[in-house]
Image: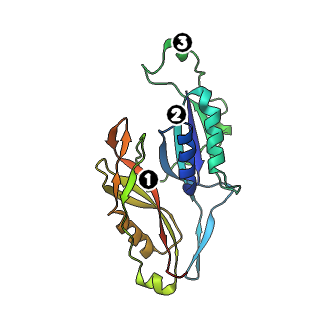
C-alpha cells in the first residue's frame, strides 16, 4: 500500500475530496498545518495598518491506497488542488504496510522497505505549531449540514461596509451537534470572525459515518458576510 500525503490550500479541500470520491476513495485524514516556502508568507492590511503573516495556513490530506492506485490518486489530487499559482502545495508518496489480517502472505512480500538514505534531500512539510495541532477523525461519509444559522452582522462592520469570508473548521459530534469551531482563514475583522463562530455553534448536522456507525468529524465551512445591494 501507499500513503499519499498532500499539502494543499484550505479552499481546495472540497475539490480534492470530490475528486477522490469519484475514484471510489472515501476515507482520508485532514490536518491543519502551516507552511513557509516560496510564498514567504504574505502581508495583510486592516484599517490602514499592515501586518506580515510569515506562515501560510495549509491543510495536510492523508490517504492510504493500494499501490496500483497511487499514481491515479496523485494525478487526481494534483488536478483538483492546482490553481496555477505559487503555494499550491506538495505531494509525498510513502510505502506503508497494512495491518495484520488485511493482506495475505503473497501481497506482504510485494512491499519495498522504506529507504532513509536520502531523507535529508526530501523537503518534508513543517510540523504544526502547538496552538494549531488538532485531533482529526477518519470517516467514510462526510457530515451533512441540516440546520444553518445566519451570523449576526456586527454593527461597526456593517457601517464601515466591510465584507468578506471566514473559513471555519467545525468539529461535529456523533450526535450531529457542533462540539468546537476554529478559524482556518479569514479576510474580515475579529468581531465578524466571532459572529461566524457563534452562529456555527448552533448548526446541526447529519453526523459523519465510519462503516455505518456515526462518528465525530471535522468539516470546513465558509461563512460569507455580504451587505445587501453590494
Disc 3/disc 2 C-alpha distance (Å): 20 Å
Residue 110 at x, y percent in the picture:
59, 17
Can you identify the residue that label 3 sits on?
Answer: 106
User: Tag 1: Cα neighbours inside 10 Å, few (<14), some, or many (≥20)?
Assistant: some
Q: How many marks?
A: 3
Which of the labelled discs sits on residue 64, or is there none?
2
Q: Residues within 10 Å of mark 2 (few under 14, many from 20)?
A: many
Answer left or right for 62 relative to 89. Answer: left
Rounded to the nearest angstrom, the CA distance separating label 1 from label 3 is 39 Å
Mark positioned earlier in the residue sequence (3 or 2):
2
Dot 1 falls on a residue whose secondary structure is strand
Residue, far bottom: 159
- Residue in the image at 46% along x and 83% along y: 158
**Quadrant position of the C terminus in the picture:** bottom right
Of all residues, the one furthest to the left in this rendering is 175
Residue 116, quarter of the rendered image = top right
Around disc 3, counting alpha carbons within 10 Å, would you say few (fewer than 14), some (14 to 19), or many (20 or more)?
A: few
Amino acid at each position: 500500500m501507499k500513503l499519499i500525503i498532500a499539502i494543499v490550500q484550505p479552499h481546495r479541500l472540497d475539490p480534492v475530496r470530490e475528486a477522490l470520491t469519484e475514484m471510489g476513495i472515501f476515507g482520508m485524514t485532514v490536518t491543519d498545518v502551516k507552511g513557509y516556502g516560496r510564498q514567504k508568507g504574505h502581508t495583510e492590511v486592516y484599517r490602514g495598518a499592515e501586518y506580515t503573516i510569515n506562515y501560510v495556513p495549509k491543510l495536510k490530506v492523508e490517504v492510504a491506497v493500494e499501490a496500483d492506485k497511487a499514481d491515479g490518486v496523485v494525478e487526481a489530487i494534483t488536478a483538483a488542488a492546482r490553481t496555477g499559482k505559487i503555494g499550491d502545495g506538495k505531494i509525498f508518496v510513502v510505502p506503508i504496510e497494512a495491518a495484520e489480517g488485511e493482506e495475505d502472505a503473497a501481497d506482504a512480500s510485494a512491499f519495498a522497505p522504506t529507504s532513509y538514505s536520502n531523507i535529508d534531500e526530501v523537503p518534508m512539510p513543517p510540523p504544526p505549531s502547538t496552538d494549531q495541532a488538532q485531533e482529526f477523525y477518519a470517516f467514510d461519509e462526510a457530515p451533512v449540514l441540516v440546520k444553518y444559522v445566519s451570523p449576526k452582522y456586527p454593527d461597526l462592520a456593517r457601517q464601515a461596509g466591510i465584507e468578506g469570508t471566514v473559513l471555519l473548521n467545525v468539529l461535529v459530534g456523533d450526535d450531529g451537534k457542533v462540539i468546537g469551531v476554529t478559524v482556518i482563514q479569514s479576510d474580515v475583522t475579529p468581531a465578524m470572525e466571532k459572529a461566524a463562530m457563534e452562529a456555527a455553534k448552533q448548526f446541526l448536522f447529519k453526523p459523519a459515518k465510519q462503516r455505518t456507525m456515526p462518528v465525530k468529524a471535522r468539516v470546513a465551512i465558509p461563512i460569507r458576510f455580504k451587505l445587501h445591494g453590494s
